[in-house]
Image (spheres, helix red, strand yellow):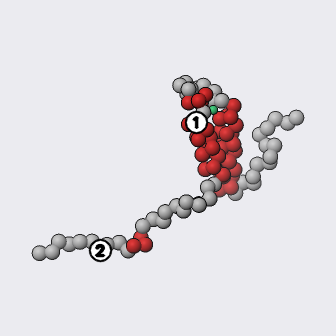
Amino acid sequence: MDERRDPAPPADSRPPLIAANAKLTATQRTWDAYSGHVLRCTACRSIRDLDAEPCATAGQLHQAWEAAAEDARRQMLGVPARAANEGRPQA
Ligand SMILES: [Zn+2]
Protein backbone atom coordinates (compact mmCIF):
# COMPACT_ATOMS: atom_id res chain seq x y z
CA MET A 1 0.00 0.00 0.00
CA ASP A 2 1.42 3.31 -1.05
CA GLU A 3 1.42 6.25 1.31
CA ARG A 4 -0.14 9.35 -0.05
CA ARG A 5 2.52 11.92 -0.81
CA ASP A 6 2.00 15.50 -1.70
CA PRO A 7 3.53 16.35 -5.02
CA ALA A 8 6.87 18.08 -4.82
CA PRO A 9 6.51 21.84 -5.21
CA PRO A 10 7.76 23.28 -8.46
CA ALA A 11 11.38 24.32 -8.26
CA ASP A 12 10.50 27.97 -8.77
CA SER A 13 7.87 28.14 -5.98
CA ARG A 14 10.35 29.24 -3.30
CA PRO A 15 10.31 32.89 -2.29
CA PRO A 16 12.92 34.89 -4.16
CA LEU A 17 16.18 35.45 -2.38
CA ILE A 18 17.27 39.01 -1.88
CA ALA A 19 20.02 39.72 -4.31
CA ALA A 20 23.37 40.51 -2.77
CA ASN A 21 23.44 43.77 -4.67
CA ALA A 22 19.89 44.75 -3.73
CA LYS A 23 19.62 48.45 -3.12
CA LEU A 24 18.70 49.35 0.43
CA THR A 25 16.29 52.14 1.17
CA ALA A 26 17.48 55.31 2.88
CA THR A 27 15.73 54.13 6.05
CA GLN A 28 17.59 50.81 5.95
CA ARG A 29 20.94 52.45 5.20
CA THR A 30 20.64 55.02 7.98
CA TRP A 31 19.51 52.39 10.50
CA ASP A 32 22.42 50.17 9.47
CA ALA A 33 24.82 53.08 10.02
CA TYR A 34 23.32 53.85 13.45
CA SER A 35 23.12 50.28 14.71
CA GLY A 36 26.56 49.46 13.32
CA HIS A 37 28.02 52.44 15.14
CA VAL A 38 26.36 51.57 18.43
CA LEU A 39 27.72 48.01 18.23
CA ARG A 40 31.28 49.17 17.54
CA CYS A 41 31.51 52.35 19.63
CA THR A 42 33.03 51.79 23.06
CA ALA A 43 31.20 54.82 24.49
CA CYS A 44 27.81 53.60 23.20
CA ARG A 45 28.43 50.01 24.27
CA SER A 46 29.25 51.09 27.81
CA ILE A 47 25.81 52.69 28.29
CA ARG A 48 23.78 50.62 30.70
CA ASP A 49 21.06 53.15 31.46
CA LEU A 50 18.37 53.23 28.76
CA ASP A 51 17.78 56.92 29.44
CA ALA A 52 21.45 57.80 29.04
CA GLU A 53 22.49 59.99 26.11
CA PRO A 54 24.41 58.25 23.31
CA CYS A 55 27.63 59.77 22.01
CA ALA A 56 27.36 62.70 19.60
CA THR A 57 27.96 60.53 16.53
CA ALA A 58 25.22 58.10 17.54
CA GLY A 59 22.89 61.04 18.12
CA GLN A 60 23.54 62.37 14.62
CA LEU A 61 23.13 58.93 13.05
CA HIS A 62 19.88 58.40 14.94
CA GLN A 63 18.58 61.78 13.75
CA ALA A 64 19.47 60.82 10.17
CA TRP A 65 17.50 57.59 10.56
CA GLU A 66 14.52 59.44 12.03
CA ALA A 67 14.58 61.90 9.12
CA ALA A 68 14.79 59.06 6.56
CA ALA A 69 11.94 57.21 8.26
CA GLU A 70 9.84 60.38 8.29
CA ASP A 71 10.55 60.96 4.59
CA ALA A 72 9.52 57.35 3.84
CA ARG A 73 6.32 57.80 5.86
CA ARG A 74 5.50 61.00 3.98
CA GLN A 75 6.22 59.31 0.66
CA MET A 76 3.84 56.45 1.51
CA LEU A 77 1.14 58.93 2.51
CA GLY A 78 1.71 61.15 -0.52
CA VAL A 79 2.73 64.09 1.64
CA PRO A 80 5.33 66.43 0.11
CA ALA A 81 8.91 65.90 1.27
CA ARG A 82 10.20 68.02 4.09
CA ALA A 83 12.00 71.22 3.31
CA ALA A 84 15.71 71.00 4.10
CA ASN A 85 15.35 73.40 7.01
CA GLU A 86 12.03 72.05 8.33
CA GLY A 87 12.11 71.25 11.99
CA ARG A 88 15.26 73.24 12.56
CA PRO A 89 15.33 76.48 14.46
CA GLN A 90 15.29 79.54 12.26
CA ALA A 91 18.44 81.67 12.41
ZN1 LIG B 1 28.92 56.05 19.94
Residue 68, position in %: x, y? Answer: 68, 48
For residue 65, above or below residue 19: above
Q: Residue 56's x, y, as percent?
A: 69, 31
What is the residue that sits farthest to the left in this orientation? 1
Determine whether 17 is above or below 80 in the image: below
Q: Which of 23 and 13 is in front in this view?
A: 23
**Residue named by callout 1:** 40
Ligand 1 resides in the quarter of the picture at: top right
Closer to us: mark 1 or mark 2? 1
* Residue type beneath disc 1: Arg
Image quarter where the C terminus lies is: top right
Mark before the other along the chain sequence, 1 or 2: 2
Q: Position of residue 20 (x, y in %)?
A: 55, 60
Write down the quadrant of residue 15 in the picture.
Answer: bottom left
Residue at (80%, 48%) from the top-left corner? 83
User: Pointer 2: what residue?
Assistant: 7
Describe the element under mark 2 as helix, strand or loop: loop
